[in-house]
Image (cartoon, rainbow, N blue to C red):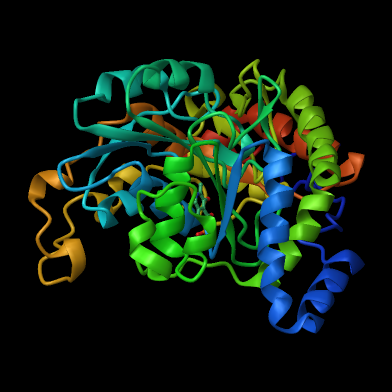
Amino acid sequence: MDRQLAIEGGAPAVTAPIDDRWEAVTERERTLVNDALDAGSAVYDEIEKFEAEFREFVGTRFALAVCNGTATLHSAMFAAGASLGREVIVPSVTWHASISPALHCGASPVFADADPETFCIDPADVRGKLTDRTCAIVATHVYGNPADMDALLDIVDGTDITLIEDASHAHGATWRGRQVGSVGHIGCFSMQASKPISGVEAGVATTNDPNLYDRMAALGHYGRVNQLLQTDALRELGRIGLGVKYRANPLGIALARAGLERLPNLNERRARWFARLDALLDDVPGVYPQRPYAQAERGGYLLYTARIDPDEIGAPIRAILDALAAEGVGIHPDQPSALYGAMHLQPLFGDFPFEGLGGPWGDLPADVRPSFGLGSLPVSERLNETCVWLPTPVDPSDAWVEQVAAAFEKVASQGDRIGQLADGDVDVDG
Ligand SMILES: Cc1ncc(COP(=O)(O)O)c(C=O)c1O
């Protein structure tokens, strides 16, 4: 390999193409969608078939298909009793949908910091944020890496706090051998196009608890409510339920059924190269791939990510990313941040004025959005500033994986030089 940095005209370390796609549509997808289209009004049967298959897969009593992952989280927080005066403890390293439904319920999101190795919510910080107003905790299995469910279950044990797993990235991941989505009280899965099971736009919520299930069903499934309800608590609402429509599109669900069949194979293939790259990066100073807890098996594998330590490498993060990009590592120009980063710093969760808006927004008291300013969640902020993520194919060639590792090694071992180039302080002889 050419040791000269590509930003200085050296040959890039990564030349192997990435020639496969996670979101492939196979004959199986086409068959299931065509069958659904041919079924006439029985097209809706897709939803029940998928729910039965997903229940079986996750191992919960109930699975409720909905129109997207955001709707699963709204349904889950609503079911948990999120409302004015109550609090939902949420991670900051996640997508906004793990948080914003709390505001739609009139409740206050309370941010907890992240664990620096796994990037998932830090149970110790969660414990410190508990109050008698806490009604739910949301734990995102970030990029398919399960959060510390033992510690979180311990926190909610003996309380009436609902533990919601945002498993939107983590289809097929396990905790102590149990599928995520069955470990907490409610599991929420996005099945949007980038996810390992996709309905292009769809979602599914799982639970073992008939009361939580009934509230989710009543919120968003008018027309189906009568047949879904397990208890009589909400039956008087009749077929309208609570009147919101979160029903899934059955054609998307037909696609998702094929995705569920293919999931074990997709996960196996991504697991293989994640493990290989983890091992290759083990000895590279200043590069720390996201780690799973010992009790966890990753699944879904949304993105391969690593935390960079710019101080250890000896160059600013921007210069390191530019050097990696020049080496052919597919670094998106918005990196770091701007993806799943410091959500607590977003205007929606800060001081954006809601006055004049409808629903609960117009008159949410200021303390419903307690402020979490810069410096309030140091680990999440640091991850937001220093994480890289890679293009994450299904089964890239060994050459690509090895070349990516070589690019990290080449850049990390020449931090001083990269720092000098960034400062414009370059010795012409190299
Ligand atoms: C962690 C997380 N939760 C929830 C969602 C929302 O899912 P959807 O886009 O299907 O509404 C996403 C979407 O990417 C996500 O990444």
Query: x and y percent of residue 429 in the render?
Result: 66, 37
Q: Quadrant of residue 123?
A: top left
Query: x and y percent of residue 244 in the render?
Result: 38, 68
Please state which of residues 17 and 342 is positioned toward the viewer in this rendering: 342
Q: Quadrant of residue 5?
A: top right
Query: x and y percent of residue 131 in the render?
Result: 20, 25
Query: x and y percent of residue 235 in the render?
Result: 38, 57
| Left or right: 209, with 55 as reference point | left
Q: How many marks?
A: 0
Please state which of residues 131 and 304 is positioned toward the viewer in this rendering: 131
Please state which of residues 41 and 323 is positioned toward the viewer in this rendering: 41
Q: Is residue 324 visible?
A: yes
Q: Residue at 52% across / 49% down in the picture?
A: 335
Q: Is residue 373 visible?
A: no
Q: Residue at 61% across / 72% down in the picture?
A: 249
In what quadrant of the picture does the C terminus appear? top right
| Left or right: 321, with 172 as reference point | left
**Image vertical order of residue 142 relative to residue 204, above or below:** above
Please state which of residues 369 and 239 is positioned toward the viewer in this rendering: 239
In what quadrant of the picture does the N terminus appear? top right
